């Protein structure tokens, strides 16, 4: 595969930002097998955003020749009080995450943060060296990467979370650091500090965040990035009624989508977002089934066609919801079937 074909794969949706595209091109021209990583906290049930959308981008990178790693950040999970900070539960849920990503992303390497820190003997000294180059105010501004802010009641361990996440990148010898767009601040931190330490500076790849099915909350602009933060309803396991989990059956998927917020406007429409970033990533055609009374079935070969049809009110929201539910069920069915024999993990997470 030539460089331009690889770039096309890497930049396709759900990629939202690459810093920088020129650096990525130089990397691909000089290294046929670059190293990639994405770090994930180990928390609740996996959903469309955490496994499917993230996994799609990992699969794109694998096809482009990358050596991809999912780092299951067990220490970060503990620091951020996920799974009640119970180390045994964190380890058990980590195995569930590992199985899911290896199933969905054939060829990916999955590692635990605790294993990395044991194997990389300079990790803690590198963490201190990195931390000497950042101020406390900047760390406080970076806490959004863990879903917290300066207004929260914090313990000291939570203040080292951003520096640990950045040091992970160096410890893994990463060429491309990948995360959702909500993790942007820590990648900018790494790109600012790494040159001062003589460390390899990673290309930063940020993918789109899949919104939850509820109505969004208006927040205004982020003062640090200038980015529009009006939608805070990203798909989250903490809001199960607005999330589609990879364990949901066909009936539950249809019911959740039937109740989903689906305005006549295309902007911020979570049902259209699923069609765009989940369905069209895997399917070249998207068929909306309707009775002959309402014009019969209609098939789209691009998201733009679907969006235009919805904007012009040629498709009813309920018909759109039913069509998206059909494709989502097909996409997650193999994962759902795989975990049917692992009901103990569902029972464990149901108690959290």
Image: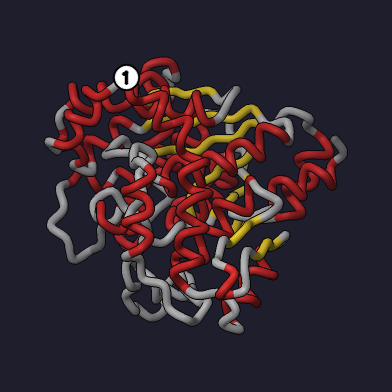
Nearer to me, 303 or 181: 303
Q: Residues within 10 Å of mark 1 (few under 14, many from 20)?
A: few
Nearer to me, 113 or 328: 328
Residue located farthest toward the top when viewing the structure as drawn: 119
- Which residue shows up at 25% across the image and 52% down it? 240
Q: Please provide percent x and percent y for residue 157.
A: 21, 42
- The kind of secondary structure element at disc 1 is helix
Q: How is the image coloured?
A: secondary structure
Q: Please provide percent x and percent y for residue 187.
A: 50, 51
Q: Residue at label 1? A: 341
Q: Please provide percent x and percent y for residue 233.
A: 34, 65
Q: Is residue 22 visible?
A: yes
Is 284 above or below relative to 221?
above
- Which residue shows up at 56% across the image and 82% down it? 313
Specify whether 32 is left or right of 148: right
Residue located farthest toward the bottom when viewing the structure as drawn: 312
Is 303 above or below relative to 328?
below
Is 29 above or below relative to 266?
above
- Which residue shows up at 35% across the image and 44% down it? 245
Q: Please provide percent x and percent y for residue 228.
A: 46, 75
- Which residue shows up at 45% across the image and 20% down it? 120
- Quarter of the image with the C terminus is top left
Q: Is residue 164 visible?
A: no
- Quarter of the image with the N terminus is top right
Please identify the quarter of the rendering in which residue 337 is found: top left
Residue located farthest toward the front when viewing the structure as drawn: 293
Please identify the quarter of the rendering in which residue 218 is found: bottom left
Nearer to me, 88 or 26: 88
């Amino acid at each position: 595969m030539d460089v331009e074909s690889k770039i096309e794969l890497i930049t396709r949706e759900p990629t939202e930002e690459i810093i920088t595209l020129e650096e990525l091109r130089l990397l691909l021209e000089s290294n046929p097998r670059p190293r990639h990583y994405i770090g994930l906290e180990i928390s609740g049930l996996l959903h469309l955003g955490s496994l499917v959308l993230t996994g799609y981008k990992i699969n794109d990178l694998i096809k482009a020749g990358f050596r991809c790693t999912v780092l299951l950040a067990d220490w970060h999970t503990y620091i951020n009080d996920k799974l009640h900070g119970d180390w045994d539960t964190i380890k058990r849920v980590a195995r569930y995450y590992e199985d899911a990503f290896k199933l969905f992303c054939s060829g990916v390497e999955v590692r635990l943060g605790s294993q990395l820190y044991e194997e990389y003997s300079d990790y803690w000294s590198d963490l201190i060296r990195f931390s000497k180059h950042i101020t406390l105010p900047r760390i406080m501004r970076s806490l959004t990467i863990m879903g917290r802010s300066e207004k929260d009641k914090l313990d000291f361990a939570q203040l080292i979370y951003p520096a640990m996440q950045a040091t992970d990148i160096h410890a893994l010898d990463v060429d491309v650091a990948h995360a959702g767009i909500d993790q942007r601040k820590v990648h900018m931190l790494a790109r600012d500090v790494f040159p001062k330490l003589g460390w390899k500076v990673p290309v930063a790849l940020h993918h789109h965040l899949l919104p939850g099915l509820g109505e969004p909350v208006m927040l205004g602009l982020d003062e640090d990035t200038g980015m529009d933060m009006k939608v805070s309803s990203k798909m989250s396991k903490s809001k199960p009624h607005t999330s589609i989990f990879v364990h949901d059956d066909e009936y539950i998927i249809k019911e959740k989508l039937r109740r989903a917020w689906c305005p006549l406007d295309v902007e911020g429409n979570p049902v259209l977002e699923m069609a765009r970033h989940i369905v069209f990533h895997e399917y070249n055609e998207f068929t909306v089934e309707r009775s002959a009374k309402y014009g019969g079935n209609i098939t789209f070969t691009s998201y733009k066609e679907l969006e235009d049809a919805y904007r012009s009110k040629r498709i009813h929201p309920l018909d759109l919801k039913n069509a998206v539910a059909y494709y989502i069920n097909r996409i997650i069915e193999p994962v759902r079937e795989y975990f049917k024999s692992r009901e103990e993990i569902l029972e464990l997470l149901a108690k959290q």
